[in-house]
Image (tube, helix red, strand yellow):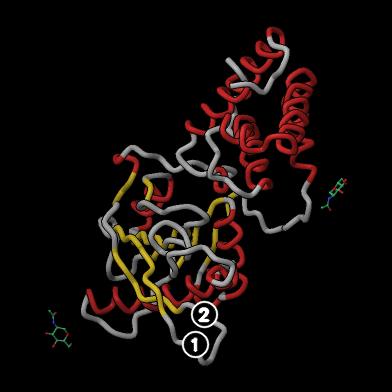
């Protein structure tokens, strides 16, 4: 198997785009969800402008089977930088059952069906930030509390809200608790990426260590070859990877690097390294169709 085939195969295995690949994967099995029934909410586009009153539709989910209406808490599961297809049936459902909690989940702005704009132009992307997302959560929290109150025909009830998040949503979960302590009784930040590191080369270094010397050197060789071929015949090398539509070279290189990296991050080094090492043994040029 050639390198292009191996990496392409890895890309196809991933249900998400490479841009979202560093996070946990969302299950495709319907039984993995407590609910996938969609609800919509009118969200403010720009929380920081006094004059811009535009809104967009933000998708959310609720699961009330375990909810003890009189005194149950509300668990807010924060979704992040990928589509949010429902409320996953994981340990939070065990906790919800135990504590009589309502489960709610809000899709992150600009992902899945919660995009304020159709086109991802730079101008349109200006409202995509974790800060706007935090205020989305705060506004939603107030909206949903009121909607629960009217559902159960009561007023002025403010239940205890607990926020959950993993990875980027883990950071949002921690930040939400810090920024809005009056809106939460607690927060769980799992693998919360609260520290941004510019040019985070340590990550790639770790991938190299995890790969081991042989596989690492093949990966480096491939990177070098693709770098060269991108300069000499970019159209051909992109076509090799089924990435003809990726016009931006940096996007393409990211795609390629990320396809390899996820094999290590998700514990499948052999799926990547075994065929690569074999290809290295038997082929002159590693990057062929
Ligand atoms: C809702 O509350 C109002 C005011 O307390 C009461 O008059 C009404 O009967 C309640 N409706 C239901 C369906 O419980
Ligand atoms: C990133 O860090 C590496 C290693 O320290 C350095 O060689 C490279 O120039 C840096 N790149 C940028 C864009 O800062």
Q: Earlier in the sequence, mark 2 or mark 1?
A: 2
Mark 2 and mark 1 residues within 8 Å of each other at the beta carbon: yes
Name the quadrant containing residue 258.
top right
Asked whether 211 or 63 is in front, the reply is: 211
Q: Residue at x 34, y 65 (%)?
A: 72
Asked if disc 2 is less than 8 Å from ligand 2, the answer is: no
Q: What is the CA distance from the residue labelled 2 to the residue labelled 1? A: 7 Å
Asked whether 154 or 135 is in front, the reply is: 135
Q: Residue at x 31, y 68 (%)?
A: 40
Asked if disc 1 is less than 8 Å from ligand 2, the answer is: no
Residue 160 place in picture, x, y as percent: 43, 70
Q: Is residue 222 left or right of residue 68?
A: right
Quadrant of the rendering where the C terminus is positioned: top right
The image quadrant where one finds ligand 1 is bottom left
Name the quadrant containing residue 267.
top right
Asked whether 96 or 271 is in front, the reply is: 271
Q: Outermost residue, bottom direction? A: 51
Residue 100 place in picture, x, y as percent: 33, 58
Q: Residue at x 29, y 52 (%)?
A: 36
Q: Is residue 213 above or below residue 75?
A: above
Q: Is residue 156 left or right of residue 200?
A: left
Q: Is residue 256 left or right of residue 135?
A: right
Residue 144 place in picture, x, y as percent: 35, 73
Q: Is residue 258 visible in the rendered structure shown here?
A: yes
Provide the secondary structure element on which disc 1 rests. Answer: loop
Query: Mark 2 highlights which residue?
Result: 46
Say how many tags the image has: 2
Badge 2: few (under 14), some or many (20 or more) residues near its Cα, within 10 Å?
some
Instruction: Give the label on residue 52, or none.
Output: 1
Provide the secondary structure element on which disc 2 rests. Answer: loop
Badge 1: few (under 14), some or many (20 or more) residues near its Cα, within 10 Å?
few
Name the quadrant containing residue 239.
top right
């Amino acid at each position: 198997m050639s390198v292009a085939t191996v990496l392409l195969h890895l890309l196809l295995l991933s249900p998400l785009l490479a841009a979202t690949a560093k996070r946990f994967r969302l299950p495709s099995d319907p039984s993995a969800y407590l609910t996938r029934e969609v609800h919509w909410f009118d969200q403010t586009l720009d929380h920081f402008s006094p004059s811009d009153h535009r809104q967009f539709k933000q998708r959310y989910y609720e699961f009330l089977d375990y909810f003890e209406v009189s005194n149950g808490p509300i668990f807010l599961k924060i979704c992040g930088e990928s589509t949010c297809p429902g409320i996953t049936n994981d340990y939070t459902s065990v906790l919800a059952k135990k504590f009589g909690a309502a489960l709610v989940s809000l899709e992150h702005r600009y992902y899945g069906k919660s995009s304020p704009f159709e086109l991802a132009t730079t101008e349109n992307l200006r409202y995509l930030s974790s800060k706007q997302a935090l205020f989305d959560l705060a506004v939603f929290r107030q909206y949903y509390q009121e909607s629960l109150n009217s559902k159960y025909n009561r007023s002025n009830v403010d239940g205890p809200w607990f926020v959950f998040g993993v990875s980027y949503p883990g950071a949002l979960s921690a930040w939400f608790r810090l920024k809005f302590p009056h809106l939460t009784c607690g927060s769980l930040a799992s693998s919360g990426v609260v520290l941004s590191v510019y040019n985070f080369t340590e990550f790639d270094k770790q991938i190299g260590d995890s790969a081991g010397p042989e596989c690492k050197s093949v990966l480096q060789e491939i990177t070098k070859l693709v770098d060269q071929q991108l300069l000499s015949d970019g159209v051909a090398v992109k076509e090799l990877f089924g990435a003809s539509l990726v016009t931006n070279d940096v996007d393409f290189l990211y795609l390629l690097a990320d396809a390899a990296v996820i094999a290590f991050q998700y514990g499948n080094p052999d799926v990547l390294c075994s065929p690569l090492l074999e290809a290295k043994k038997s082929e002159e040029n590693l990057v062929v169709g």
